[in-house]
Image: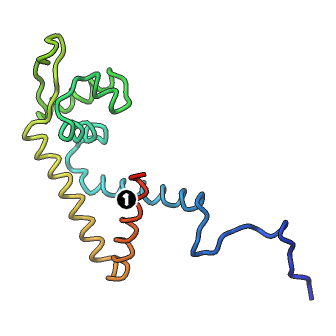
Amino acid sequence: MPDTTETPATQPTTPPADDPAPDVLAVRLAAVVSRLLRKLRTESAESLLTPSQRSVLARLESDGPATTAALARAEFVRPQSMRLTLAALESQELVDRAPDPEDGRKSLVSVNAAGRATLAGLRAAKHDWLTEALGAEMDEAERRAVAKAVTLLDRLVEQ
């Protein structure tokens, strides 16, 4: 009969299945969140907006009017790239441009009623898919587990 005892130095240090290692959990969580975000984007793909355009439109809605340079800084892109993004949003008539009252050489871009309606439609499509998926794919106990996970994730990102 072979010796099945191992010394602590040679025994792997893996935590029990109900207590995964933080590095393993971080990789798995990031992958799942990434897939969820991709799925949510595909559920609202009919808008024909790129992720960058959606992000800028949402930023303008939440933060208010901004210059091209300020948007570029906020979105971590070059001003030239932001100009292209804004041109696409303007061509779809989702944003308006007006002179900056503090500096007439600049202009402020703001989301308009059509842009707000587009964002509302995107959000509704995502919400509808997620609501349907949670109801159809999970039982009550699983939904409670997801609710607890959401609370924990919320706490994690608030740190």
Query: Residue 19 at what x, y percent from top left?
Result: 58, 71
Residue at image coords 21%, 37%: 63
Name the residue at 21% across, 31% down.
88
Residue that appears at 19% across and 33% down: 89
Q: Quadrant of residue 73?
A: top left
In the orientation shown, which residue stands out farthest toward the top?
105
Residue at x 22%, y 43% (from the top left corner):
48
Query: Residue 111: x and y, percent?
Result: 14, 35
Question: In this figure, which colouring scheme has been used for the structure?
Answer: rainbow
Image quadrant where one finds the N terminus: bottom right
Between 45 and 64, the one nearer to me in the picture: 64
The amino acid at mark 1 is: Asp
Residue 62 in the image: above or below residue 128: above
Q: Which residue is mark 1?
A: 154
Residue 98 falls in image quadrant: top left
Taking 3 as reference, is 34 left or right?
left
Where does residue 135 sit, x and y in percent of width and height? 27, 76
Residue 108 image position (x, y, % from top left)? 16, 23
- Residue 132 vertical position relative to residue 70 in the rendered view, above or below: below
Around disc 1, counting alpha carbons within 10 Å, would you say few (fewer than 14), some (14 to 19), or many (20 or more)? few
The one nearer the camera, 30 or 101, is 101
Q: Mark 1: which secondary structure?
A: helix
Q: Vertically, is 36 above or below 4?
A: above
As drawn, is 96 to the left or to the right of 17?
left
